Amino acid sequence: MHKRLDAFLLQRGSLVLMWLLIAETVASPVADRYPHIGAAMALIIMLSVLLGARLSVSRKLVIRVVLPLSGLWFLARLAEGLSNEQDIYNLVSHSVGLLLSCAVLWALFDRLHTSQVTSSVIAEAFISYLVIAVAFSQLYWILNELVVDSFNQRVTAAHSAEFLYFSMITLTSIGYGGIVPLNPFVRLIAALESMTGIFFVAIVVARLVSAYRPLRERADTAIQEGS
C-alpha cells in the first residue's frame, strides 16, 4: 500500500496538489465570510503542504522550515476562525503565511531543475505561479493594516480574498483598476509583483524550451541513424 501511494504521488501528486490549490483559491471568499469554514480550509491547506513535502527534493528545507511554519500558520488560522479576538491572530496568520509562501517557493524551485518536460513539471510551475500571488497577497494585507491610505478603497482585515484578487491581476499584468494602490511604497510593491510575473513566465518558458530541445535533438539523431 505504501509503495502504491508513493508511486501515485510520484506520477500524479503534483497535479493533485495543483487542483487542490486552485480549489482553495476559488473558495477563499467563502473562508472570509464564514471563519469556521476558513478554519476547516486551513486543515485542507495543511494537508496539501504535507503532500507537497513528499514531493520536495530538499527534505531538509521542508523539515526544518516549511513544516514548522505550516504548523504555526495552521494554529494561527484555527485560532482566527474560532476565537472572538481575531485582530492579533489575523496579523500572525498573514505574517507567518508570507514566510510560509516564501519557504514553499524555495522548495518548489528545487523541483524545477529538471531536464524533462512532463505534466508534473508544468503543474509545479503553475503551483509556483499561484504561490507567488498568495505571497504578495499576504504582503498587501499587512501593508493595508500598517500603511495609511494603501489603496483607493478600504478593504477590511476580514476580506483577504480581495488582496488575493488584486495580487493575481497584478501578477498577470491585467490590472482591471477596481483596486488601485495609492501609497507610493505600495505602488512600488505592486510594480515589483508585475515584473516578477513577467520574469517568471519568461524563465519557465525558457526552461521548458531548453529541456525540450535535447529531446528533439536525440530524436532527430535516432531518425538519421535509422535511415
Image (cartoon, rainbow, N blue to C red):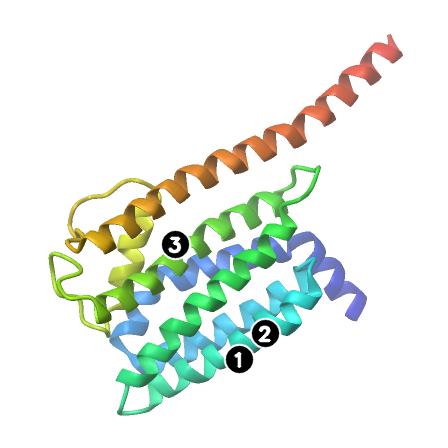
| Residue 1 seen by the camera | no
- Screen quadrant of the N terminus: bottom right
Q: Amino acid at mark 1?
A: Gly
Mark toward the start of the polypeptide (2 vs 3): 2
Question: Which residue occupies 36% across, 72% down?
Answer: 94
Percent position (x, y) of residue 103? 54, 63
Residue occupied by mark 1: 71
Name the residue at the right extreme: 226
Q: Which mark is residue 67?
A: 2
Percent position (x, y) of residue 224? 83, 10
Q: Amino acid at mark 3?
A: Ala
In the rendered structure, the answer to whether residue 22 lies left or right of residue 60 reads: left
Label 1: few (<14), some or many (≥20) within 10 Å?
some
Real-space Cα separation, disc 1 to disc 2, in angstroms: 6 Å
**Element carrying mark 3:** helix
- Screen quadrant of the C terminus: top right
Percent position (x, y) of residue 143? 26, 65
Residue occupied by mark 3: 133
Work out whether 121 lies above or below 27.
above
